[in-house]
Amino acid sequence: MRLVQPVQVNGAPGSPYTRKMIAILRYRRIAYQLLIREQAEARGLPAPKVRLIPTFYFENDDGEIEAVTDSTPIVRFLEGEVMSRSVIPSDPALAFLNYLLEDYGDEWLTKAMFHYRWAYEADIAHAGEILPRWGDLAADDETIAPRAEFVRRRQIERLYVVGSNETTGPIIESSYERLLLLLSAQMNNGPYCFGARPASSDFAIFGQLTQLTHTDPTPEAVARRIAPRVCAWVSVVEDLSGLDVTSDEWVSREAVPMTLKDLFAEVGRVYAPVMLANAAAVNSGADAVEATVDGARWSQEPFPYQAKTLNWVRQERARLDPVDRAWVDDFLTGTGCEVLFA
Ligand SMILES: N[C@@H](CCC(=O)N[C@@H](CS)C(=O)NCC(=O)O)C(=O)O
């Protein structure tokens, strides 16, 4: 497969993974064309195997267009196609931590995004009005009304997928608030998680935050109250095309600040027990994931895709050479993330 610029991308403004990837393309100065929803079909582009957005269209060895999904492997594919302005730290140990933090952003923080949007009346009403309009800006209110109802019903029915329910809602919300404070604290040591230049984990967290801090009213109010700095960060990360970077702007492993370790302690507190319990439920064919997070019960339906991403995280760690792996293991000791690799 190869990248042909401008690369066509099918997505939507309300999709955190679309926002993650478009921000990476901008930062990396990779030319793109964003096609909102049905615009891709209108161009006759093929459908991906699993219909998810963002969908990227690359060229295969026969010169045909291929539809590809899943942001994390696409980020790595783009690294091979365009060398400059990489979003993967050059130190393999930090590249692994970045991978783990990216998966936290994609797979845990999305629970907050989906939960707030579809659990509160004000957010449901707002999202129902806005989401169906992106693909059809000229549509009148009468045309939008049934589409708004459709999207509300479908998404509320899907809340179970990310594990948002009465038991888990308070855990998700307090974890979102802690993340905002931890990111604010990390910014005392530089704007990004791995130094003065952004990594893919920054963009993964950013993608979810575009919805939480700049779209949905309930989590936006929380962020503006407790973490205005994070709101400002999200606005800037959206377009880092003008940021000049040099290769020595990654943090060195010796200089990793305590605030980054604190961020990993949050990953270990919530993501780790749930990912582990989910993988166990998927592998044993159980009908429910049962875990304890922060001393409280976590119960949700198994999510097979997240068992797969946990395997990918484990493979990334296994690939490290023994010295780097020992450093990573030492760094993660006491964060709660160790259980993922026990
Ligand atoms: N793991 C995927 C997740 C993509 C995903 O879940 N996309 C959502 C929207 S944010 C989706 O396409 N849902 C189905 C739909 O909206 O029709 C990635 O990283 O790209």
Image (spheres, rainbow, N blue to C red):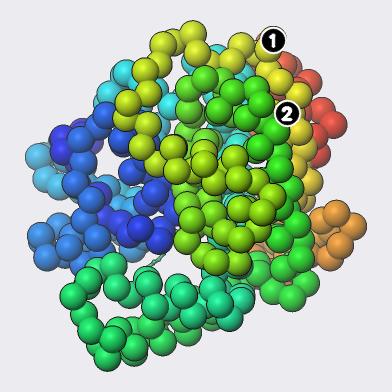
Q: Which amino acid does label 2 sit on?
A: Thr
- Residue 321 marker: none
**Residue at 31 percent of width and 19 percent of height:** 83
Q: Position of residue 89 (x, y in %)?
A: 51, 20
Q: Position of residue 238 (x, y in %)?
A: 40, 41
Q: In which quarter of the image is residue 212?
A: bottom right
When the figure is inspected, residue 189 is found, relative to residue 271, above or below; the finding is above
In the rendered view of the protein, which quadrant contains the C terminus? Answer: top right
Residue at (80% x, 39% y) in the render: 336
Which label's residue is closer to the chain start, 2 or 1? 1
Q: Is residue 329 left or right of residue 303?
A: right
**Does residue 204 show up?**
no
Position in image of residue 206 (x %, y %)? 50, 44
Q: Residue sitting at 47 percent across and 34 percent down?
A: 200
Q: Is residue 196 left or right of residue 33?
A: right
Quick one: SS at disc 2? helix
Is residue 10 shown to the viewer in this render?
yes
Q: What residue type is labelled 1?
A: Glu
Read off the residue under disc 1: 254
Q: Is residue 341 above or below residue 327?
A: below
Q: Give the farthest residue toward the right.
A: 295
Q: Name the residue under label 2.
A: 259
